[in-house]
Image: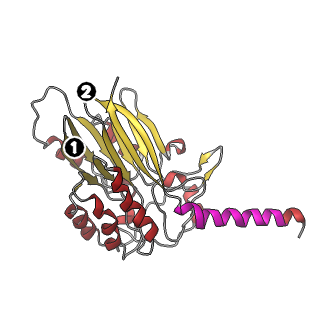
Amino acid sequence: MTRTGRLLGATALGVLAWATLVEPRLFTIRRGALPVLPEGAAPLRVLQLSDLHLAPWQHRKIEWIRSLAELRPDLLVLTGDLLGHSRALGPLLHALEPFRGVPGVFVHGSNDYYGPIVKNPFRYLSAPSRLSTREQDLDNAALTRGLVELGLIDLNNAAARLEFGGSTLEIFGLGDPHIRYDDPAEMQESLRALPRRRKKVGPLRLGVVHAPYQSALNALLDEDPALILAGHTHGGQVRVPGIGALTANCDLPVRQARGLSVWYDAERASYLNVSAGLGGSIYAPVRFACRPEASLLTLEPAD
C-alpha cells in the first residue's frame, strides 16, 4: 500500500471512530430567541427534546437529559421517537422524572410504536423510510400513560390551552405523518372545542409534529401558529461541512433539516424549529458534523 493509501485509510478510520464513538455523545443545547409574544409579556423558555431513541444502557444520555431540568424551562415539548428499544420505557421515564410539574406536551413518532430494525442506511438518500407492513411491537399505550402521569399533555391530533402568567398558549399537534397517523380534521375539532375566551388579545399558538412533511406543516399553518416544532430528521445525522444535510428523511427541503427557519405559503408564515434530536437507531449510531442536541427557545415580546 502506498503512503497516500495508508494516509487515506487512517483518515477514514479516524472519521469513523469520531462519528461512532465521540460525536454521538457530545450532547449540546441549541438556543434561539423568537419575538412572538405581545408587548409587555414575560419571556417564556421552551425546551424541546426530540428523537432520543433511548436504549436502556445509554446512561450518559439519561443523566444529561435529567440535568436539563436545571434550565428551569416554562414549557417542555417532546416531539417524538423517544424510544429506541423494547426495554427503554422505564429508563425514559427516569430521564424525564426531574421535569415532573413542568407544563409539557408530547406527540409520538414512528419509533414510539415500532422498535428498531437493521436497515440499509443508503436507502435514506433515495426515499423516506416510511413503514407500511410491520406489526406494532412497542407498548405505545404504556408510553402514553407514563408521559401523562408525569403531567404531560397528549397532543396527537389534539389541542390544549395553557396559561403562563400574562400569556396564553394554544398548542396543537398531529400524529406522526411518517406513518400516516396524522389527522388534521381531528386536531381541528379538538382546537375548536377549547373553551371560548373573552380576552381581546388572542392567544399565542404553537404547532407540534414529529415528522415535518410539507402536508403536515401546511395543516398546522392553517391554524395560524407563531411557531411549529418538529423533529424526525436528526438534522441529516451525517452532514457534509460546507454543504449540510444530504437527507431529511421526508419531503422537507434539506436546508431546513436542522434549526430555525420559516415555513410559509403565499399568505401566512410561521417560525419552524426542527431539532436534530439526541439519538439515532441502535443499528446506525453515527453522527458527523451534527451533534445531538436539545433546543431551548426563548419566546420574547415583539418590538
Is the residue 230 above or below the residue 96 in the image?
Answer: above
SS label for mark 1: helix
Q: Position of residue 264 (x, y in %)?
A: 41, 33
Task: Find out whether residue 19 is within the magenta segment.
Answer: yes
Q: Is residue 236 left or right of residue 99?
A: right
Q: Nearer the viewer, residue 156 or 12?
A: 12
Residue pointed to by mark 2: 40
Q: Position of residue 284 (x, y in %)?
A: 54, 67
Give the mark, 1 or 2, whose residue is nearer the N terminus: 2
Q: Position of residue 19 (x, y in %)?
A: 61, 62
Residue pointed to by mark 1: 188
- Disc 1 and disc 2: Cα gap in Å? 30 Å
Is the residue 280 above or below the residue 260 in the image?
Answer: below
Q: Nearer the viewer, residue 10 or 253?
A: 10
Q: Nearer the viewer, residue 14 or 109?
A: 14
> Which of labels 1 and 2 is toward the front?
2
Q: Quadrant of the C terminus?
A: top left
Task: Find out whether residue 97 is within the magenta segment.
Answer: no
SS label for mark 2: loop
Q: Position of residue 95 (x, y in %)?
A: 34, 65
| Residue extent of the magenta highlight | 6-25
Task: Looking at this view, name the residue that lies furthest to the right.
Answer: 2
> Residue drawn at (32%, 35%), measured in percent from left and top?
226
Q: Could you say which disc has been placed on residue 242 in the image?
A: none
Is the residue 182 above or below the residue 143 in the image?
Answer: above
Q: Main secondary structure of the magenta part?
A: helix
The amino acid on which the numbered mark 1 sits, given as a three-letter code, is Gln
Q: Is residue 289 left or right of residue 216?
A: right
Residues at circles 1 and 2 in contact by the CB criterion of under 8 Å = no
